[in-house]
Image (spheres, rainbow, N blue to C red):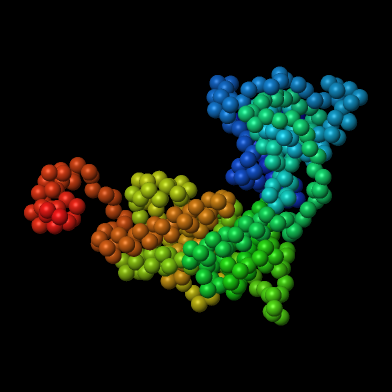
């Protein structure tokens, strides 16, 4: 029995859907990357009842009953039909179908113009939005039986891609503009002032990274380095405008690469925000090597954490040169599998996430929590690690009023009779 036939015979829980980049078959494309493109895949439902629940939740209705594609079914028109399927195109509405039998490759382009190949086999359901260019290719089995579904985002008009589909990753503008926009936003927040800090974003097999020693708020999309997943420079921005000095790759590069390799990150941010430094100074005062806080709403913004959880962020010792932090950062990442960041004492923080949006959200939540912890300690002498007392232990309103009035103050903290 061949590989494709084994796929056809296996049940939906017997294997995971396979996704990978065509220019590097050993590099898988995560579901998080597909989700950023608006692609949804259901490959792990257990039975027909669970499938019906998915269809109801997504408001999908059966558009056409089962139809098969094979040389036997289509006869002389098979080759022409398959060739048309393999042309890059997009549809004006959502495309939703379920594999009843057989297997098929769905190729989609990501935002960095990389081809991602999705292998769909029996019982798997996929939704592709109208914004995504795609093509369909039969496997060597040359047989596929599908069910087509209709989503609220209807449409049927097919549009071929008019521009050259082989735009290189290095000239693709979206990711470059995204990094530049993030630099300006983080500068306004005080995270990358004085040429400090750095940002890197991954799309496909390419990593877009800010250079070292430049004013982050004045960067342009052409100022970025582009690296592969091994950290090799693929594109150099050239000379600094108005200078004979060449741009220098960020000293954060080896630290960024650790998170990409160890955590499969979609983006890594390095901030010099004051809140981060203050948090490490507080931990220094308490003689602890980890920042800890619990029972705060913003903890929920960290992947894998909830309100009742204790958030733990490791702290590594600073060095005179950024690149010398790489080994310490790697050890901290390995020792704290739940952590989404590492603090650097008297320096700043490295934050990562499965997508640039998640990395940004987590960085915002962490800066808030660091500032909150310092103020809790300084203003009220409170331990940010401690859970709150039970509400039942608080004084009832009448007792609290008497206590306040007895101290010469009203309930509003103003003199009596004010």
Residue 396 lies in quadrant: top left
Left or right: where 159 falls relative to 180? right
- In x, y percent, where is residue 233? 70, 65
Residue at the image position 12 percent from the left and 53 percent from the top: 417
Left or right: where 389 falls relative to 173? left
Q: Depth check: 220 or 175 in front?
A: 220
Left or right: where 226 falls relative to 323? right
Which residue reaches farthest top? 65
For the image shown, how many numbered marks are present on the structure? 0
Q: Depth check: 151 or 363 in front?
A: 151
- In x, y percent, where is residue 177? 65, 58
- In x, y percent, where is residue 270? 53, 64
Residue at the image position 74 percent from the left and 30 percent from the top: 156
Check the image and report above or below for 260 versus 320.
above
Can residue 250 be seen at all in this image of the molecule? no
Residue 198 lies in quadrant: bottom right
Q: Depth check: 214 or 269 in front?
A: 214
Which residue reaches farthest right? 76
Can residue 285 be seen at all in this image of the molecule? yes
Check the image and report above or below for 133 versus 259.
above
- In x, y percent, where is residue 384? 31, 57
Image quadrant occupied by the C terminus: bottom left
Check the image and report above or below for 128 versus 64.
below
Which residue reaches farthest front? 418
Residue at the image position 40 percent from the left and 50 percent from the top: 298
Image quadrant occupied by the N terminus: top right
Residue at the image position 48 percent from the left and 57 percent from the top: 363
Which residue reaches farthest bottom? 244
């Amino acid at each position: 029995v061949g590989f494709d036939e084994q796929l056809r015979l296996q049940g939906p829980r017997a294997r995971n859907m396979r996704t990978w980049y065509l220019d590097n078959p050993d590099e898988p494309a995560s579901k998080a990357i597909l989700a950023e493109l608006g692609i949804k895949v259901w490959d792990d439902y257990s039975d027909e009842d669970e499938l019906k629940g998915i269809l109801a939740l997504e408001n999908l209705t059966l558009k056409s009953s089962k139809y098969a594609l094979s040389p036997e079914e289509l006869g002389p028109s098979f080759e022409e039909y398959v060739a048309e399927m393999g042309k890059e195109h997009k549809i004006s509405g959502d495309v939703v179908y379920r594999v009843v039998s057989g297997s098929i490759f769905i190729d989609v382009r990501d935002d960095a113009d990389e081809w991602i190949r999705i292998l769909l086999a029996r019982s798997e359901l996929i939704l592709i939005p109208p914004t995504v260019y795609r093509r369909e290719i039969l496997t060597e089995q040359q047989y596929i039986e599908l069910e087509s579904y209709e989503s609220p985002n209807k449409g049927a008009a097919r549009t071929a891609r008019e521009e050259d589909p082989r735009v290189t990753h290095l000239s693709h503008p979206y990711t470059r503009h995204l990094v530049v926009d993030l630099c300006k936003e983080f500068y306004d927040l005080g995270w990358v002032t004085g040429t400090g800090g750095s940002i890197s974003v991954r799309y496909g097999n390419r990593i877009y990274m800010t250079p070292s020693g430049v004013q982050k708020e004045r960067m342009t999309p052409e100022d970025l380095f582009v690296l592969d997943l091994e950290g090799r420079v693929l594109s150099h921005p050239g000379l600094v405008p108005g200078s004979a000095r060449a741009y220098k790759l960020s000293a954060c590069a080896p630290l960024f690469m650790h998170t990409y390799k160890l955590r499969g990150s979609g983006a890594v941010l390095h901030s010099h925000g004051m809140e981060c430094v203050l948090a490490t100074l507080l931990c220094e005062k308490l003689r602890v090597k980890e920042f800890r806080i619990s029972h705060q709403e913003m903890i929920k913004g960290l992947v894998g954490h909830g309100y009742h959880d204790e958030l733990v962020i490791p702290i590594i010792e600073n060095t005179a040169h950024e690149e010398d932090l790489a080994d310490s950062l790697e050890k901290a990442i390995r020792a704290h599998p739940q952590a989404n960041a590492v603090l650097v004492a008297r320096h700043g923080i490295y934050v990562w996430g499965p997508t640039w949006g998640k990395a940004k959200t987590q960085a915002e939540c962490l800066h808030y929590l660091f500032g909150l912890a310092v103020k809790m300690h300084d203003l009220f002498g409170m331990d940010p690690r401690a859970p709150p007392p039970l509400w039942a232990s608080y004084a009832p309103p009448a007792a609290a009023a008497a206590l306040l009035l007895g101290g010469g103050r009203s309930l509003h903290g103003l003199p009596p009779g004010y």
